[in-house]
Amino acid sequence: MIYKLRKKFIKICTLSFLAVFVVLFSVIYLLSSLQTDRSLDTLTDVIAENGGRFPIYEPFPPKQGRPLPPSRLDEETPFRTRFFSVRLDADGAVIFVDTKAIISVDQSNAIAYATAALEKDRERGWIEEFRYKICDTSYGKEIVFVNGAVERASGRGFLMTTLSVFGVGSLAVLLLIILSSKWAVKPSAESYAKQKQFITDANHELKTPLTLIRTNLEIIKEENGSNEWLADIDSEVEHMTDLVEHLVALARMDEEQEKPVFSVFDLSRAVDETVDIFASSVTGTGKNLSVTIPENMMYNGDESAIRQLVSILMDNAVKYCDVGGSICVTLHNERHPSLTVDNSYAAVDHLELPRLFDRFYRADKARTRGGFGIGLSMAKAIVEKHRGRITAQNLGNGTIRFQVKL
C-alpha cells in the first residue's frame, strides 16, 4: 500500500509539473509567434504605405508634418530585408511585379504567391516562408511579401533552447520528486504501519478471550442448558470473531506482497456454486432469486478470491434486499467478464453510492441489519487485485446494482 501511495505521489507531482510545463511552453510559443508576426507586419505596412519600397531613413527628428519612421527601421533595414510585391488592377489582372529586393523569387513565382494569398481571402497571413499583406490602392490591389525565414528560424531556435532547458529541468525535478517521495509519504507510512500493528496485536489479544468465552459458554450450556441470555452472548462472540477475522483479512490485502498467482478456472461454475449457497437464505426469507450464468466461461485469476467476492456481493444483497423483493445475478462476457448483482432496496435514493466501498461505512445508520461495513471494501480490494472495476448504480424503481468488470 505504501508503495502504491508513493507511486501515486510521484505520478501526481510529475503530471502537475508537466501540465505547468505544457502551459508555459504553449504561452512562450504563442508569444514568440505573435512577436514574429507583429515584427514582419510592421515591415509589410511600411513597404505597402510607400508604394512597394522602403522610405528614406531619417536619423534625426523629422521636419514638422513629416512622420517618424517605425522604431524598428534603421539605415540597414532595406538591405537585410528580402521582399517583393505584386500589383493588380481593379479586374485582378497583374500590372506590375517588383522582385528587385529578392533573388530566390522570379516573376512567375511572385504571381503564384499572389494568387495563393488572394485565395486565402485574408488581409494578412503566411504563404510558406513569406508574410504577406493585401492592401487596396487607387488602381486596384497591391500584395506585399516579406521573407520571414530568418525570423522563423530564430524563433524555432529559441523554442528548441527553451524546450531543452525545460527538459533538463523536468528530469531534475522528477529526480527530486522520486528522492523526496519517500520522505513525503513517511508520515502516512508510519501511520499505516501503526495501524497494521494495532490490527495484528488486536487479533492476538482478542482471539484468546473470545476463545475462552466460547469454551466457557459451551461448558455452561452442557451443565445448565441453553437459554436466551447465553444465546445472546454466543451470538455476540460469533459477531466479534467475524469482525476480527475480517479486519485481519483486510489488513493482509493491504500488505506489500508479490502478485497473486493466477490460474485458469471455470468462472461460470465458481459463480454458480457460490450463489447456490445463498439460495436457501433468499427463498427462506420470501425473496425471489434469478440467476443467468452461461456455461464454461473460463477466466484467469484467483478462484478463491473470486468466490469470496461473489459471496460478499450475495451476502450484501440478501442482507439489504427488501422483504418480498428480488435478487438478480447475471454473468456475461463482453470484452471481459462482467458480473452484476441487482437487488430491491427502496432506500437506494438516499444512499451515498461512491462511499459504499469505504471501510466501515454503513448505509444503515441505525445498524439494524448487522455487518461491519468492510465487506464491500474487501470486494473492491479483490477486484483491484484482478485489475478490474466495481461500481454501485441506482437503476431506479428502488433497485441497486453492483457491477464488477474483471
Image (tube, rainbow, N blue to C red):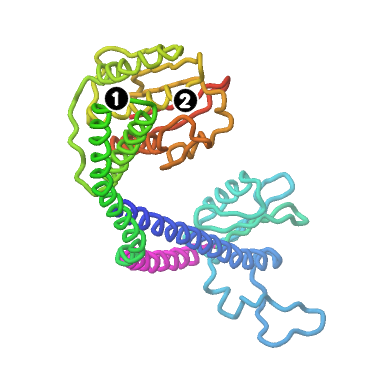
Amino acid tagged 1: Gly
Residue 142 sits in quarter: bottom right
Name which quarter of the figure residue 378 lies in.
top left
Q: Is residue 24 left or right of residue 74?
A: left
- The crowding category of the residue bearing disc 1, from other C-alpha atoms within 10 Å (few below 14, some 14 to 19, many at least 20), is few
Q: Residue furthest bottom?
A: 60
Pick the residue in front: 157 or 69: 157
Q: What predominant SS class does the magenta segment belong to?
A: helix
Residue 284 location in percent, x, y? 40, 12
Q: Which mark is residue 225?
A: 1
The residue nearer to you, when weighing 337 against 127, is 337
Work out which quarter of the rendered image holds the C terminus and state it.
top left
Cα separation between marks 2 and 1: 34 Å
Q: Is residue 179 magenta?
A: no
Image marks 2 and 1: residues in contact by CB distance under 8 Å: no
Residue 237 appears at what percent x and percent y? 32, 36
First in residue order: circle 2 vs circle 1? 1
Q: Amino acid at mark 2?
A: Tyr
Q: Nearer the viewer, residue 66 or 53?
A: 66
The mark found on residue 151 in the picture is: none
Task: Please give the range of residues in magenta.
Answer: 147-176
Above or below, 201 against 273 in this view is below
Residue 25, position as x, y percentages in the image: 47, 61
104, above or below 404, in the image: below
Q: Please determine whether, in this image, residue 297 is positioned above or below residue 105.
A: above
Residue that numbered label 2 is attached to: 320
Is 163 covered by the magenta stretch? yes
